[in-house]
Image: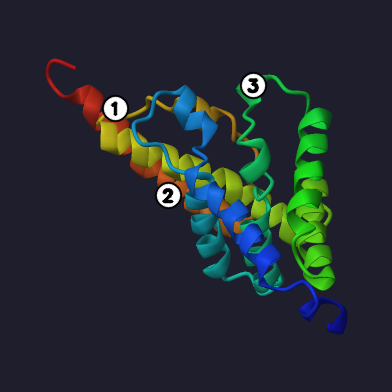
Amino acid sequence: MASGSSGLGARPLLQFLRLVGQLKRVPRTGWVYRNVEKPESVSDHMYRMAIMAMVTKDDHLNKDRCIRLALVHDMAECIVGDIAPADNIPKEEKHKQEEEAMRQITQLLPEDLRKELYELWEEYETQSSPEARFVKQLDQCEMILQASEYEDLESKPGRLQDFYDSTAGKFSHPEIVQLVSELEAERNASIASAFSKPGS
């Protein structure tokens, strides 16, 4: 602990906070490409994921670690932006860019924190723990929840179907499976009712 808590001063910490603060202004690319009005930011997405991790009932998972993973997993995007599948950037290249960004960001922190944040990011990237795998499912569950909210806001049920298609077969954690099942039931009812209205 001693190695980290003193010595660097407030200036680098302030730089770090400004840097991650940029996540408030990085829009989620998937929504931008689909012309969603006022798309959420990366930090909006990570915030709800952290809340989802916080309310899990799974006692086999380290809940605190899940919340930390949720808060760190997209942190590199404050430098590289939100690289979406549609950008056609190879996985290895995306990983390389984000790895470099994480080294840059964590350089501003005391040694103990630098190590913790970088290792959390790496754990998520390599999916090397049950917590990381759970948080990956939260990531995709949060995305389709957001998609359904945009469909509701725009009164265009079913418009963002491809986001749902991209997650097919990806959910295995019982709580998330239950949540997704409820979400899809509500969404399907809303799509059905829109198409059964006269003139639709």
* In front: label 1 or label 3: 3
Whether 111 is drawn above or below 30: the answer is below
Residue that mark 3 sits on: 87
State the separation of the CA atoms marked 1 and 3: 25 Å
Residue 187: image quadrant is top left
In the image, taking residue 33 as reference, residue 70 lies left or right, namely right
What amino acid does circle 2 point to? Glu
Distance, label 1 to label 2, CA atoms, is: 19 Å
Q: Residue at x 68, y 60 (%)?
A: 69
Residue 18, percent from left and from top: 58, 56
Q: In which quarter of the image is residue 152?
A: top left
Judging by the rendered image, the residue that carries numbered circle 1 is 156
Of callouts 3 and 2, which one flags the residue occurring earlier in the amino acid sequence?
A: 3
Residue type, numbered disc 1: Lys
Q: Residues within 10 Å of mark 2 (few under 14, many from 20)?
A: few
Residue 91 as seen in the image, left or right of residue 43: right
Q: What element carries label 3?
A: helix
Q: Where is residue 15 in the image (x, y as percent from the top left)?
A: 64, 58
Q: Nearer the viewer, residue 103 or 61?
A: 103
Residue that label 2 marks: 182
Residue at image position (59%, 35%) is: 167
